[in-house]
Each structure stands twice: as C-alpha cells, then as structure tokens.
Amino acid sequence: VLPQVYVITPTYRRQEQLADLTRLGYTLKHVPNLLWLLIEDSDSLNPLVADLLKKINVPFVHLNGKVLSILIPNSLSFSNISARIPEEYQKKKGKPRGVSNRNLGLEWIKKNATDGAFYFADDDNTYDPELFEEIRKTVNVSMFPVGVCTPYQVSSPIVRDGKIIGFYDGWKAGRKFPVDMAGFAVGGKFLLSRPNATMSFVMGKEEEDFLRSLDPFEISDIELLASNCTKILVWHTRTQKNAEAPAIDVKYNDTNLVE
Ligand code: UDP
Ligand code: MN
C-alpha cells in the first residue's frame, strides 16, 4: 500500500477563497491515498467551503477551532484548541498567517496519523500532483525547491554530491533553515517522536521555529526530493486580492438590466 499523504491547508474567508480552494481541490484529486485537512481561521465553518469539499470529493477533514465536519471514519473533538488567530496577533499589522490553523493540523496528525507524511499546503499556491508522490517518500524531514518565491525567484537547498551545502533563498534573516513553508514535508512517525513540534507566532520565523522545534534534527538529516532538488513542483503563487467589499453601491438600477 502507498503511504498516506496528509495535506494541511490553512484557509480563511475572503472573496478569492472558493476560487483558490477549487483549484487546489481538483489538483489534490489526482493524488491517491491523500487526506486533505482543510482548517479554517474562523469561528464557524464556511458552509460554502463544506459544500465545495463534498462536490470535489477528495477525502477530507474540515476543521476549525470548535466545529468538526468529518467525512472519514475518524472523529475527535478539539474543544480546547482554537484555530482562530489569537486576539493579540489579530490587531498587529503584520500578523502570522495560518499559524493557528497549522498547529491544529499538527495536533490532528499527532492524534491520528501512525504512518505516512504531512505537508503544509497554503490554499493559493500552485502544486504539480507529482509533488505529493515525492512527499510520500518522506521518512523524517524532506526538502525540495519552491518556485516564484523570495526575490531570488526560487527557494531551495543547494546540493552537491547528494548533500546540502547551503540554502538559496532571498530572505535568509539569520535562519538555520532558510526555507519556505511549501518547501518541506515531515514523516508521521517522525512527528510522533517529537511531541514538542509546534509552529510559533513570530512573523517570518514560522518555518525556522517549526523546524527547530523538531529537535533533535540537523541539516544532515534532511532527505532530498525532486531529483536532488533539481525540479520545481510547487510555486508560491499569490492570488491577487480583490476589494473586501464593493467600492461602489451595486444596487440594481437601469444600467444593470437588459433593455
Ligand atoms: N491564512 C489564514 N488566515 C489569515 C490569513 C491567511 O488562515 O488571516 C492562510 C491562507 O489561506 C494561506 C496561508 O494562511 O493558506 C498563508 O497566507 P497568505 O497566502 O495570505 O500568505 P502569503 O502567501 O502571502 O505569505
Ligand atoms: Mn499565499
């Protein structure tokens, strides 16, 4: 049997949400033995998202901090964990995006996964289905290049003779692991052996702090995927934000009606 791939996707309500999730959902549909953990940064599940999940019909778990809607046999409750971003960070200008949801995903994996590998897949990135076949091979922690990411346009480990000799990333910021959220995956068993694994709310240090929380874990432990990091199978694309609300009054009037 193929090892399971768990895809943890943080998402939140906005005009582009259903468009982004439609594209991602039908991409995931090409991948066997995959479970999609779609986790909303909200107080209640968006019913339109729930409908979309049923329509796409990829095996999924739809979560937020309080409500569960599960179409797989596993069922558990998370009454004490919230996937809503904490108040103190809500007000900040640059808030860490998707951290509380990803942490909830981690808790789910710790409780439910015994095997396989998981991956943090943001809802607006672009994924080649082949990426997930690579991720499936992950035992401990794997890494691979991410396209259209940072001013360098690619973020990737630099590999010589099958070993990492550095990181190519346009935003190093003194990090030990200067990688993008989309550039690594983690084995299920490995996570279970690291009970302190968690993502911090420090902006810009999400990846770094998470990977450091996997201690003991060193650069020499990293498994290289995508043909020794020579192939780009994921792109950090960004969906252009539309206005939060219509800028003009869009009441029906003569100009909206067919003559
Ligand atoms: N996100 C979230 N809550 C927010 C903002 C973002 O859950 O308030 C999710 C979003 O849906 C995405 C991830 O967090 O899956 C990263 O956010 P975004 O794509 O805006 O960040 P960027 O790619 O611009 O760094
Ligand atoms: Mn994004």
Image: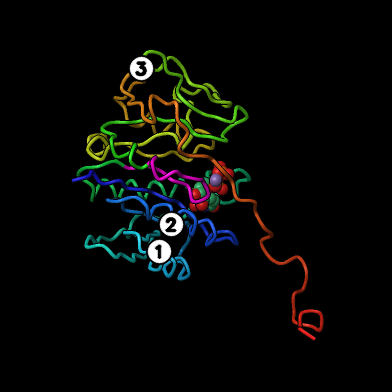
For image coordinates 45% across by 51% down, the residue present is: 10
Task: Specify the quadrant that holds the C terminus.
Answer: bottom right
Which label sits on residue 113?
none
Residue nearest the observer in this picture, 244 or 215: 244
Instruction: Give the quarter of the image for residue 230.
Output: top left
Residue 14, given in percent of the width and then of the height, sits at: 58, 60
Q: Decide which of 18, 226 is in the foreground and name it.
A: 226
Look at the picture and state if 101 lies above or below 161: below
Label 1 CA crowd tier, 10 Å (few <14, some 14–19, many 20+): some
- In the picture, the disc for residue 162 is 3
Could you tell me residue 100's position as x and y percent?
Answer: 43, 49
Whether the magenta-drawn stretch holds residue 207 is answered as no
Q: Nearer the viewer, residue 47 or 223?
A: 223
Q: Is residue 188 left or right of residue 257?
A: left
N-terminal label among 1 and 3: 1
Task: Point out which mark residue 26 bears.
Answer: 2
Residues marked 2 and 1 touching at CB (< 8 Å): yes
Q: Which of pointers 2 and 1 lies earlier in the amino acid sequence?
A: 2
- Local packing at callout 3 (Cα closer than 10 Å; few below 14, some 14-19, many 20+) is few
Does the magenta portion include 126? Answer: yes
Q: Position of residue 22 (x, y in %)?
A: 48, 59
Which residues fall within the magenta stretch?
Answer: 118-131
128 or 204, nearer to the observer: 128
Q: Can you say whether 174 is above or below 233 in the image? A: above
Callout 2, which amino acid? Tyr
Q: Residue at point 46% right, 65% down?
A: 49
Q: Secondary structure at mark 3?
A: loop
Dividing the picture into quarters, in which one does residue 119 lie? top left
- The residue beneath circle 1 is 56
